[in-house]
Image: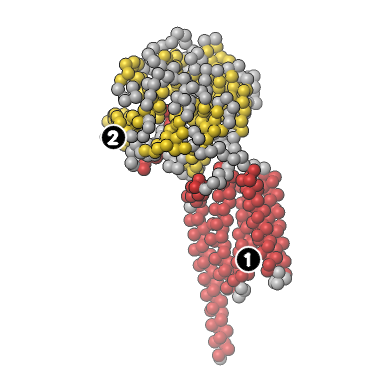
């Protein structure tokens, strides 16, 4: 009778262990899902740790490694507790449960590696996944046949993990060194509300919300909501003038306008600024009117030449050039209606498609002047060509920075260490230009990492880098001083002045 009772209680204990294993599996699976949702936060944390260290590997490789690490962490949260619970149910040691749990975790990571193809070469990615899986299966098989081969099993687990991580290590080791960090001179907050770190408008418009004007820095931003006017949502906009030496706010103007209709600022060549909000108004550094004003009865102004002398008024059809000092039209009329940049005599655009001549290309740069249209460049990819000076043009695309002259001849070509750069601005004397790099998380869309690299225009040598700590909603503001030796970058919540080292 006692033996039957012991057998009965033993069966109940086994059943209880299997029930516990099922509960552990379910709970750990939910925790693994929560871990996956936290991966974007882990990526931000990872970038902050890298910023705080002397190591600055390529962002694309970091993202791929963070994603792989997040997948492995989520699988570990699910599989390792489940494996330990199952090992207890079947009566094997915890060490065996850990070994087989790690093996299964890495095998599933190999599956992710195979399908996600995080590296640039799918063939290399799949070869690594197969190699890692073979090592793991061999170690597990030998350990299962020969229980004494525990050490060999652990070695196979370590080797399988190393195979998956090795290409990232090679990428980090081979990455070119970053230029020195720009020296931060001061930081200020135009609005203490942390929400203002998001307040930089669109990625393109953000570069025109802060400018240098004489001994001041002018900035304009959305300072909060305002009461509706009828059914129209409204916003409060603030225009401020900061001391160049200290960042202290001296003058400020506030007005109410349509929500989402962000004003813009343009730096002129005579130490004034042009404020654009429907009409154009020339301002002194202290925000007082400088005299010239232009009421725009149609079209819009969206571009100013690098030297601050000429504005492009999109009169549609065509473009009218304006003198930035007087805001009066210049002689002649240009037929192009959607310019991406302007100098004193012509405009650039990427809206004209020369498919008839080049059917396999998707990106075209066209210069339009009083004599007509001139194709300067065509290729597979690119974005918004810009004048760097009267005679130089910059094109960004396919991870390459190209400097062209007005005939389309490539003067310099420099590869970037990361994906898709965006043009951030050029100094008024044309000596330096800046390129921004922003890594965006897809869901929800928000920047994970952002930095700017400053280049010498003559040599395209990288001079300095600035890493944005308080990430905006889109791209951060960026504006050069006229001589290119200092610049501001950031957002209304945290705006900083930097000097080149």
Relative to 426, does residue 452 appear above or below in the rendering?
below
Residue tagged 1 = 99
Which residue sits furthest top? 331
Q: Please state the horizontal and vertical placement of residue 145, each as a whole percent of the image.
A: 72, 69
Q: For this rendering, which residue is in front, 79 or 374?
A: 374
Q: Position of residue 31 (x, y in %)?
A: 49, 59
**Looking at the rendering, which quadrant does residue 155 occupy?**
bottom right
Sequence order check, earlier mark of 1 and 2? 1
Question: Circle 2 sits on which residue?
Answer: 226
Is residue 178 at all visible to an observer of this figure? Answer: yes
As drawn, 197 above or below 9: above
Of 161 and 11, which appears nearest the observer? Answer: 161
Could you tell me residue 172's position as x and y percent?
61, 45
SS of the residue under disc 2: strand
Residue nearer the viewer, 431 or 372: 431
Q: Position of residue 403 (x, y in %)?
A: 58, 24
Please say if the residues under marks 1 and 2 sit with CB atoms less than 8 Å apart. Answer: no
Q: Residue at x 62, y 74 (%)?
A: 92
Alpha-carbon neighbours of circle 1 within 10 Å: few (<14), some, or many (≥20)? many
Dot 2 alpha-carbon crowd within 10 angstroms: few under 14, some 14 to 19, many 20 or more: some
Residue at x 31%, y 36% (from the top left corner): 225
| CA separation in Å, label 1 and label 2 | 61 Å
Q: Quadrant of the N terminus?
A: bottom right
């Amino acid at each position: 009778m006692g033996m039957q009772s012991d057998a009965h209680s033993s069966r109940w204990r086994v059943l209880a262990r299997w029930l516990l294993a099922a509960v552990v599996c379910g709970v750990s699976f939910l925790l693994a899902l929560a871990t996956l949702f936290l991966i974007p936060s882990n990526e931000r944390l990872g970038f902050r740790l890298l910023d705080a260290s002397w190591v600055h590997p390529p962002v694309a490789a970091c993202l791929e490694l963070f994603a792989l690490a997040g997948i492995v962490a989520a699988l570990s949260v699910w599989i390792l507790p489940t494996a330990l619970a199952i090992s207890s149910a079947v009566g094997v040691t915890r060490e065996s449960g850990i070994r087989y749990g790690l093996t299964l975790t890495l095998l599933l990571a190999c599956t992710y590696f195979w399908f996600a193809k995080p590296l640039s070469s799918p063939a290399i990615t799949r070869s690594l996944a197969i190699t890692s899986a073979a090592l793991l299966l061999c170690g597990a098989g030998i350990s299962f046949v020969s229980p004494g081969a525990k050490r060999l099993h652990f070695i196979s687990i370590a080797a399988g993990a190393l195979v998956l991580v090795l290409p990232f290590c090679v990428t980090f080791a081979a990455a070119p060194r970053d230029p020195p960090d720009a020296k931060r001179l001061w930081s200020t907050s135009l609005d203490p509300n942390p929400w203002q770190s998001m307040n930089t408008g669109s990625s393109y418009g953000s570069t025109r919300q802060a400018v240098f004007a004489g001994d001041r820095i002018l900035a304009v931003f959305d300072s909060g909501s305002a009461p509706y006017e009828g059914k129209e949502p409204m916003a409060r906009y603030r225009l401020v003038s900061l001391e160049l030496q200290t960042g202290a706010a001296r003058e400020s103007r506030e007005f109410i306008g349509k929500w989402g209709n962000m004003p813009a600022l343009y730096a002129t060549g005579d130490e004034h600024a042009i404020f654009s909000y429907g009409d154009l108004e020339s301002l002194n550094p202290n925000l007082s009117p400088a005299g010239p004003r232009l009421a725009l009865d149609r079209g819009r102004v969206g571009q100013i030449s690098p030297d601050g002398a000429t504005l492009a008024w999109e009169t549609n059809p065509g473009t009218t050039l304006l003198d930035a000092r007087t805001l009066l039209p210049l002689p002649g009329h240009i037929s192009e209606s959607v310019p991406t940049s302007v100098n004193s005599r012509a405009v650039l655009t990427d809206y004209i498609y020369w498919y008839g001549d080049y059917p396999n290309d998707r990106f075209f740069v066209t210069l339009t002047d009083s004599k007509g249209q001139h194709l300067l460049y065509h290729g597979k990819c690119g974005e918004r060509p810009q004048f760097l000076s009267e005679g130089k043009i910059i094109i960004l695309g396919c991870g390459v920075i190209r400097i062209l002259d007005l005939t389309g001849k490539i003067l310099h070509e420099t590869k970037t260490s990361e994906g898709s750069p965006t043009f951030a601005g050029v100094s008024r004397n044309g000596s330096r230009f800046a390129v921004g790099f922003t890594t965006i998380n897809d869901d929800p869309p928000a920047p994970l990492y952002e930095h700017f690299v400053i280049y010498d225009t003559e040599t395209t040598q990288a001079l300095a880098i600035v890493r944005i700590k308080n990430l905006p909603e889109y791209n951060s503001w960026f504006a050069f001083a006229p001589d290119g030796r200092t610049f501001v970058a950031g957002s209304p919540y945290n705006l900083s002045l930097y000097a080149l080292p």
